[in-house]
Image (cartoon, rainbow, N blue to C red):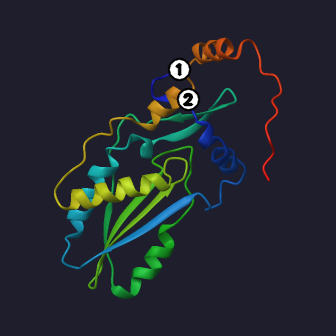
Amino acid sequence: MSKRMFPITCEQQGVYFDCIIDPENLRYNNPKIISFPVSFAPEDVAEAVCSVLECHPVLFSHFEDRDGSPMQVYADECKAVVEVLNVGDDDIETVKQNFIRVFDISCGPLYRAQVLAAPSCVSLLLDFHHLVYDGASLNILMNEICAAIEGTYPSAEPHSYRDFSDAQHADKTDHKAYFDKMLGGGVTSTSLPSDL
């Protein structure tokens, strides 16, 4: 198996199969909008966001079925693209509404990012697929984006989702032997009190 490809995790399975059954649904999109004062340079915001996205290879991955097994595939290169779009104040809501659309999980990246430069504000539009982004990811990415905008660029993540998947699918033979020894060959019924 390629080092770029690995089995999906237990946590991803339900979302993956739901996406296969109903690929046009937006329920697994995680859109965010961050507004900045007009004094922020849109190009600086885009550059900061690119630097953060590129530190998280999972965002550039996609999913494939290999011999009946769903696999997550990392991209060979993680080069983020964040478009800066100049818009009028009257166009902001329309652009925001059109930004959220279905992800094709069979090809990455599984994020979208765009900076809107309007006369009244600068807005960062982000959308992530839930297969590669969850609630814990929000705080991490927002902190990194804010730090990058202030000039402190992030470094590559020390532990990736790939590491988590590898650990989850690792050979558990040693674990089984340990518990077999500790439990003495089996578990008999116990007499635990029921909750009142």
Q: Classify mark 1: helix, strand or loop.
A: loop
The residue carrying pointer 1 sits among few (fewer than 14), some (14 to 19) or many (20 or more) residues within 10 Å by Cα, namely: few
**Which residue is at a point 23% across and 57% down the rendered structure image?**
147
Kind of residue at badge 1: Met
Picture layout, residue 37 above or below residue 188:
below
Rounded to the nearest whole Å, what is the CA distance between mark 1 and mark 2?
A: 16 Å
Residue 188 visible in the snapshot: yes
Comparing labels 1 and 2, the label whose residue is closer to the camera: 2
Q: Is residue 85 left or right of residue 14?
A: left
Question: Quarter-wise, where is residue 77 in the image?
Answer: top left
The residue carrying pointer 2 sits among few (fewer than 14), some (14 to 19) or many (20 or more) residues within 10 Å by Cα, namely: some
- The residue under label 1 is 1
Picture layout, residue 173 above or below residue 148:
above
Residue 35 position within the rendered picture, expressed as x and y whole percent measured from the top left: 33, 75
- The residue under label 2 is 168
**Which residue is at a point 55% across and 29% down the rendered structure image?**
168
